[in-house]
Image (spheres, rainbow, N blue to C red):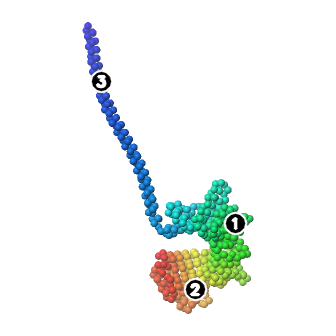
Amino acid sequence: MSQTSSWEDANRLMLDRSIRAVEEMKEMIRDYEVQDTGLSEREASLRNQLKEVEFRRKQLSDTLEETRTSLERMESTVNRLKCVLSPMRRLPSDILLRIFHHFILQSQEYMQEKFEKWKIIETYPNPVILSSVCSHWRDVVKQNAKLWDSILVRIPTIISTEEEGEKKGEGHLNSIRHWMTFGLQERQSLFIDEYKPKVKDKMYAALQSESPLWKAITIAIINEDPFVPWDIGKLRADDVLIYLNQSAPWMNSVTELLRYATNLTLTGILPPWGDTPWASLRSLKILPYACDEPANPLNFGEGELRSILNAAIHLQTLELSFALPDETVESSDVQNQEKVEHQALKSLSIHMHHIQANGHLFGARIVGPCFENLIVLSSSRARLDSAPFIIETWQNFTSVEFHEIKDHEVPTVVEFLRRLPNVTNMEVRGKNIDALINLFNVFYAHVPPKYATIPVPKLTKFIMDATDIRGKTLISFLEKRITQREGGFDWISAMTEVKLYDADYVTPGEWARVNDLLQFGRLNSSSNQTGIISGQ
């Protein structure tokens, strides 16, 4: 009986504990349910807030897009206003055109330099570049024909046989036609790069205009087939420049073009003159071969000089701007030599080593009653006899111009001036002029005998550019000339004009003394201290 009671007590105790555990669990579940209800309500509240945020963000995104669109419109308007109010638009048309003309001038200089150096012409300044800036510039460019003065013809592109090359060639020909149209058929300059005889109908058709006379034609000739004539009957120009880089190219096919030129520049070779005088030619310039290849020296001498003077009967200006090989040319026999007379030649440009020791130019006895201006391109390698020569060639020149004179060439220049007794105007450039005038001062330091030859006794106008002359040297020169004149040497002319440009060694006080000496000689001084001397 007691065992049963004990078992019931144990079960009752366990029941009580279980009931308490159940109550505690129910209490815990009620707490969890309360928390769950609270979190659920909070979640619903947060979801509502999220939806509201998403909605507000969508509105903000739409507003931002509209704002960006408005900003683009405003920036576009600002840019248009900037273009309208640009200082370039406020420039007068004539000023804008001056700027454009300077830009286009660089194009001509660029192409000329490429032809001289025998290099490929890449992109160059042209009116197409100007017209791409804005519509205003485009209108200005199209309405001014002078901006379309230079036309470049690229022959290798035109003669291509491939399909792509043919298309490029057609496009280039159309460009040439448009260029001529914008030029309003006025006289334009034509640059033909690498001219070849294979090119015929297409190029000639493009270059034929209502006015067949071009202002200038520049051609670079690679080679020529003498059996394939070039149809250049419609091509004429006052100025013709032919560039070659071969030792013996043919020029027969362009003779017709050369014959009608007024100013002709050739490199390395003379044209076939023929039996008919070249009546149109007034100026002839002979240059070395393009690139000046040492392996291809010019073959030029007395015969070539005679052929020029005999063919170009109205030639007024001749420039022989090339150097001869180093070997010395033997002097010709003066007594048995026939004179070469030319009635029109006025200006002659040479290197001093073109003159033989006896004073003849390439060995020729040239006589010209119109000789006026002599330009000495260089004084190196001169070979003059020690005794002054009196030859007709140099007697009539009244103006002489020396380019750069090197230090060791000063005595040679003085000796050469003794062969020019009638020079009244002299122009010198570069350094070593102070040494040159000091040698003049030695000649004028004493009273010479009547038979003596003093350099430039008739000199009245003296122009110096970027020289090293000192003021005291110039003053001494004028003082000694005045002393000679006062001594009774009327054949010595007093100076009437002295001009210095970029003179770094003449002070204002020394220039005032120069003016006083000119005035003292009772001569009309055209000097103006600020205009004559610059660079101080």
Q: Residue at x 67, y 70 (%)?
A: 257
Element assignment for label 2 = loop
N-term-proximal mark, 2 vs 1: 1
- What amino acid is at disc 2? Lys
Q: Nearer the viewer, residue 367 or 489?
A: 367
Marks 2 and 1, Cα distance to the nearest angstrom? 54 Å
- Nearer the observer: mark 2 or 1; the answer is 1
Q: Nearer the viewer, residue 328 or 17?
A: 17
Residue linked to disc 2: 458
Few, some or many C-alpha atoms within 10 Å of disc 3 (few <14, some 14-19, many ≥20)? few
Residue 101: where, in percent of width, then height? 53, 68
N-term-proximal mark, 1 vs 3: 3
Residue linked to disc 1: 231
Residue 412: where, in percent of width, then height? 61, 79
Q: Residue at x 50, y 63 (%)?
A: 136
Element assignment for label 3 = helix
- What is the number of the mark on residue 26? 3
- What amino acid is at disc 3? Lys
Q: Residue at x 29, y 24 (%)?
A: 26
Q: Is residue 80 left or right of residue 279?
A: left
N-term-proximal mark, 3 vs 2: 3
Marks 3 and 2, Cα distance to the nearest angstrom? 139 Å
Residue 356: where, in percent of width, then height? 67, 78
Few, some or many C-alpha atoms within 10 Å of disc 2 (few <14, some 14-19, many ≥20)? many
Marks 1 and 3, Cα distance to the nearest angstrom? 118 Å
Element assignment for label 1 = loop
- What amino acid is at disc 1? Asp
Q: Is residue 78 left or right of residue 173?
A: left
Q: Quadrant of residue 418?
A: bottom right
- Nearer the observer: mark 1 or 3; the answer is 1
